[in-house]
Image (cartoon, rainbow, N blue to C red):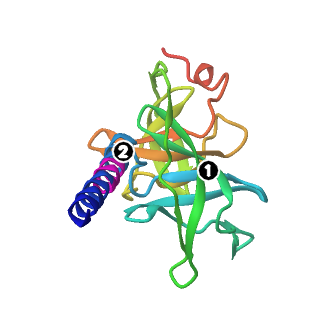
Amino acid sequence: MSDLLSLSLGFAALFIASLLLSYGFTRLVRRRQVPAPAPGAVLRLRAESGVYRARFVGETPEGWAFSAPLSRDAYVPLRIGEDLLIEAGFASGVMTFRTQLVARFNDTHVMVAQIPRTVFKRERREAPRVAASSAILVEGEGAQLVDVSSCGVRFKADRNYKRGDRIKLEIPEWEAPVFGWILETEAAGTRVRFEEELSGFLELFPQK
């Protein structure tokens, strides 16, 4: 009887171990399959209390880490367990996902969100580009346009900008400041993706 009981317990332990192993493997595969934002990418967070901006820090064992959002020069006290809708830009579009806040570190002003089950990607077709040579201001510093489109611009400047930086551009042909994020910096110039497509912007730069 004791041998039968021991055998039954052994099978039960083996069954439970296999379930745990399968669960862990499934979570590992899921983590690897879900694409994370690029380090330094600008995030748009929609929480219960409002819409904020943050910057993606990286992946951790607990989840995806991002900088604590600011509002009026004060850190926003998001709650543990609060539902978040997050948008992050990438080279050819925007990724969107829903998640929950799982940790908050007040000393480093870093927050951690649960790795989402699904990330939705919205690709943006590359808009036509035309050459341009206007002098502009980027974060108040002088720069020179190289080409433009309705979704973004390329410019040259003395300063090096990091991928994911959110910047303000002042373009003489456009009546208001334009905001966007840095896609990349290369020999041909720095590429910027506008936060919103500017209808009619391209028509301000007719080709000769």
Please identify the residue farthest to the front as the structure is shown. Answer: 1
Residue holding disc 2: 184
Q: Which residue is depicted at the point 43% across and 58% down?
A: 40
Does residue 136 lie above or below 130 as drawn?
A: below
- Looking at the rendering, the stretch of residues picked out in magenta corresponds to 16-24
Residue 187 belongs to magenta span: no
Q: Which mark is residue 44?
A: 1
Q: Which residue is depicted at the point 55% across and 70% down?
A: 103
* Of the two numbered discs 1 and 2 in the rendering, the one whose residue sits closer to the viewer: 1
Q: What is the magenta segment's predominant secondary structure?
A: helix
Q: Amino acid at mark 2?
A: Glu
Please identify the residue farthest to the top as the structure is shown. Answer: 208
Quadrant in the picture for residue 81: bottom right
Q: Amino acid at mark 1?
A: Arg
Please identify the residue farthest to the right as the structure is shown. Answer: 49
Quadrant in the picture for residue 91: top left
Q: Position of residue 178 (x, y in %)?
A: 63, 43
Q: Position of residue 140 (x, y in %)?
A: 57, 59
Mark 2 lies on a secondary structure that is: strand
Does residue 80 lie above or below 115 as drawn?
A: below
Left or right of 176? Residue 8 is left
> In the rendered view of the protein, which quadrant contains the N terminus?
bottom left
Camera-side residue: 121 or 160? 121
Q: Position of residue 202 (x, y in %)?
A: 58, 22
Q: Which mark is residue 192?
A: none
Mark 1 lies on a secondary structure that is: strand
- Mark nearer the N terminus (1 vs 2): 1
